[in-house]
């Protein structure tokens, strides 16, 4: 059984992570798995319950847990068309489509991106590691490490703000000029910068620069500003969403990761990874302009 550590499920201690992921496995059994060497992190056996995990790590449990009432789904390789925009021996970058989750979860049914990445990795001889995240309904650039060492480095770079992230978002209502939203999320510092690109009757197209990487940061910040992302079914405006769906054909949240750039950890070069705005979002803008 393989379990993937990301910012959503990360716990500093290995035992806490296992307790969260293996909800129906007795605590005594979890510690027995650790003591008997049945747990490995990034292909290395770990027996210390306090071992510190980081986003990008892969945890494997070498035991059949089917005797318990609920078994965490095993992530198996599944063929999936991947839009690869960059690849070398250490990492790859995808143009992720909206509507696909990164990995399995309690509310996720069907094939996820990690299923497809594992299939591709099996063909190419590497194990994929997710080092950051995009929401299911957000499209754009997604960076994936191809080995545990690169996963640790990239996770550190994302965490320490050594990565530039730029998004395009269509938000409800009118904004002007250039602004910064500095509002904590879950008690943690969160800073979002935006530049207005184009104004429409009911919405504003903005370029968004993230200075921190909190969960749902862009969506939460613009909602708090009173200008939620158009199409956002959690933090958005139902009336606005209905208008854009029925009148302009928008059936997802208008949020796209346009660019991610950083110094390559293994090469003396800067990567500037870009993903063009999807056709369905370009179509919405064309209809707004018309």
Image (tube, rainbow, N blue to C red):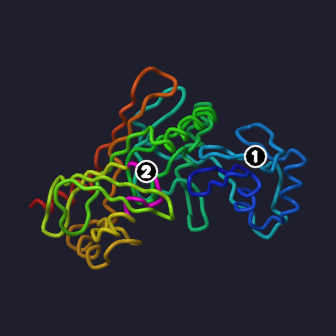
- Density class for disc 1 (Cα within 10 Å; few <14, some 14-19, many ≥20) is few
Residue most toward the bottom? 239
- Density class for disc 2 (Cα within 10 Å; few <14, some 14-19, many ≥20) is some
Q: Distance from label 2 to label 1 (Cα)?
A: 26 Å
**Residue 252 falls in image quadrant:** bottom left
Q: Residue 43 shows which numbered tag?
A: none
Residue most toward the top? 268
Q: Position of residue 46 (x, y in %)?
A: 80, 42
Dot 2 lies on which element?
A: loop
Q: Position of residue 251 (x, y in %)?
A: 32, 66
Q: Residue at horizontal 36%, vertical 49%?
A: 257
Task: Give the magenta-colored segment's residue range.
Answer: 211-219
Q: Position of residue 70 (x, y in %)?
A: 75, 68
> Is residue 196 toward the left or the right of residue 237 in the image?
left
Q: Residue at horizontal 20%, vertical 69%?
A: 173
Compared with 213, 275 (above or below) is: above
Dot 1 lies on which element?
A: loop
Residue most toward the left? 290
Badge 2 is on which residue?
A: 212
Q: Residue at horizontal 59%, vertical 58%?
A: 104
Q: Is residue 206 magenta?
A: no
Indicate which disc, 2 or 1, sits on the residue closer to the N terminus: 1
**Residue 238 falls in image quadrant:** bottom left
Q: Residue 51 shows which numbered tag?
A: 1
> Is residue 7 toward the left or the right of residue 69 in the image?
left
């Amino acid at each position: 059984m393989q379990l993937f550590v990301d910012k959503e499920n990360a716990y500093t201690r290995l035992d806490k992570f296992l307790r969260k992921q293996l909800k129906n496995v007795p605590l005594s059994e979890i510690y027995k798995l650790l003591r008997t060497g049945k747990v490995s992190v990034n292909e290395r056996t770990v027996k210390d319950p306090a071992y510190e995990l980081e986003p990008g790590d892969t945890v494997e449990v070498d035991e059949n847990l089917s005797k318990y009432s609920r078994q965490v789904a095993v992530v198996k390789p599944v063929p999936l068309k991947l839009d690869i925009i960059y690849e070398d021996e250490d990492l790859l970058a995808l143009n992720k489509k909206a509507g696909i989750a990164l990995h399995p979860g309690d509310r996720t049914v069907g094939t996820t991106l990690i299923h497809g990445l594992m299939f591709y990795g099996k063909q190419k001889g590497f194990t994929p590691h997710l080092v950051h995240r995009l929401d299911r309904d957000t499209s754009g650039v997604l960076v994936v490490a191809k080995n545990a060492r690169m996963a640790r480095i990239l996770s550190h770079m994302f965490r320490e703000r050594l990565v530039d992230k730029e998004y395009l978002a269509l938000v409800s209502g009118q904004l002007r000029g250039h602004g910064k939203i500095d509002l904590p999320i879950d008690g943690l510092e969160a800073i979002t910068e935006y530049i207005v690109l184009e104004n429409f009757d009911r919405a504003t197209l903005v370029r968004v620069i993230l200075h921190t990487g909190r969960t749902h940061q862009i969506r939460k910040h613009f909602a708090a500003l009173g200008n939620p992302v158009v199409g956002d079914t959690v933090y958005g405006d139902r009336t606005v969403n209905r208008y854009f769906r029925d009148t302009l054909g928008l059936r997802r949240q208008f949020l796209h990761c346009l660019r991610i750039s950083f110094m390559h950890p293994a090469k003396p070069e800067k990567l500037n990874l870009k993903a063009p705005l999807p056709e369905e979002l370009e179509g919405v803008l064309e209809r707004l302009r018309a």
